[in-house]
């Protein structure tokens, strides 16, 4: 004698359901992989921070080097104008960071006589410098362009750049006040990004 257990038979799925699920899965996975492979390089960092490795801020100036309030160290010549910038956060070696000053149109600024970049310690002494003795582009071209005073300061290209240091930017004998110049810093070892800080 056959007894009906009351179980409801499970209907079989039509073949097109499985095919549709497979196609959707392939499309989603392909889109994810394509997005990872074709992702463009990171854009330049806006503002004052580029990741967690480096951050600058608080630009003051320009001061005329032979005028009141000017830093006593970092002026390449007496008639030059300089900005003072604080290094807020940094976890990189000195030699990894390159600076440049660019105009509002993106081109590198040109010092009409002298100019350059001096990194000062907490006591106000120069520990690293890139200075122009004549007219030229306000840009550190590569890591080897920095000059270190290792014998007296102990600082070299491998020393950690931290927030105890500050930066003096000498823009030459022509004041750049209010013209929209931008201080940029790059770390070529970390990729194509840069950080930008407007100079007053």
Image: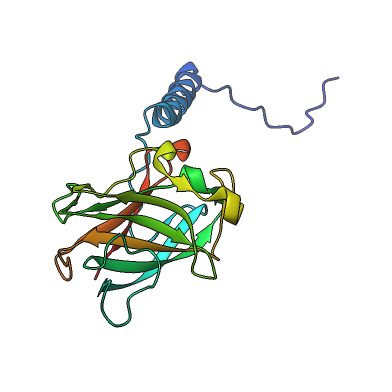
Say above or below: 45 vs 126.
above
Residue 179 % position (x, y): 14, 65
User: As rendered, which of 43 and 22 lies closer to the eye?
Assistant: 43
- The C terminus - image quarter: bottom left
The residue shown at (31%, 68%) is: 83
Residue 129 on image: x %, y %: 41, 52
Quadrant showing the N terminus: top right
Q: Quadrant of residue 171?
A: bottom left
Choose top left, top right, bottom left or bottom right for residue 7. top right
In the picture shown, does residue 174 fall above or below 191?
A: below
Q: Residue furthest right?
A: 1
Residue displayed at 52% across by 54% down: 52
Specify whether 116 is left or right of 189.
left
Residue at point 52%, 52% (across, down):
53
Compare residues 41 and 174 and report the one nearer the observer.
174
Q: Is residue 193 above or below residue 103?
A: above
Q: Residue at x 49, y 16 (%)?
A: 15
- Place of residue 55 in the rendered image (x, y in percent of width and height, measured from the top left): 45, 59
Residue 74 or residue 56, whichever sits in front = 74
In this image, 145 relative to 170: left or right? right
Number of labelled discs?
Answer: 0
The residue furthest bottom is 68
Q: How is the image coloured?
A: rainbow
């Amino acid at each position: 004698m056959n007894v009906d257990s009351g179980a409801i038979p499970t209907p079989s799925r039509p073949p097109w359901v499985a095919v549709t699920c497979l196609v959707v899965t392939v499309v989603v996975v392909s889109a994810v992989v394509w997005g990872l492979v074709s992702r463009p390089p990171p854009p330049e960092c806006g503002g004052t921070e580029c990741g967690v490795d480096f951050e600058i801020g608080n630009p003051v100036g320009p001061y005329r080097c032979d005028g009141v309030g000017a830093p006593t160290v970092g002026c390449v010549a007496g008639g030059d104008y300089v900005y003072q910038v604080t290094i807020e956060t940094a976890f990189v070696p000195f030699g990894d960071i390159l600076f440049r000053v660019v105009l509002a149109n993106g081109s590198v600024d040109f010092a009409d006589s002298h100019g350059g970049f001096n990194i000062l310690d907490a006591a106000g002494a120069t520990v690293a410098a890139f200075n122009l003795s004549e007219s030229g582009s306000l840009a550190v071209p590569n890591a080897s362009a920095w000059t270190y005073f290792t014998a007296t300061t102990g600082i070299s290209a491998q020393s950690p750049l931290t927030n105890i240091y500050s930066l003096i930017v000498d823009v030459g004998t022509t004041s750049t006040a209010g013209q929209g110049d931008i201080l940029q810093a790059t770390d070529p070892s970390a990729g194509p990004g840069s950080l930008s800080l407007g100079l007053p």
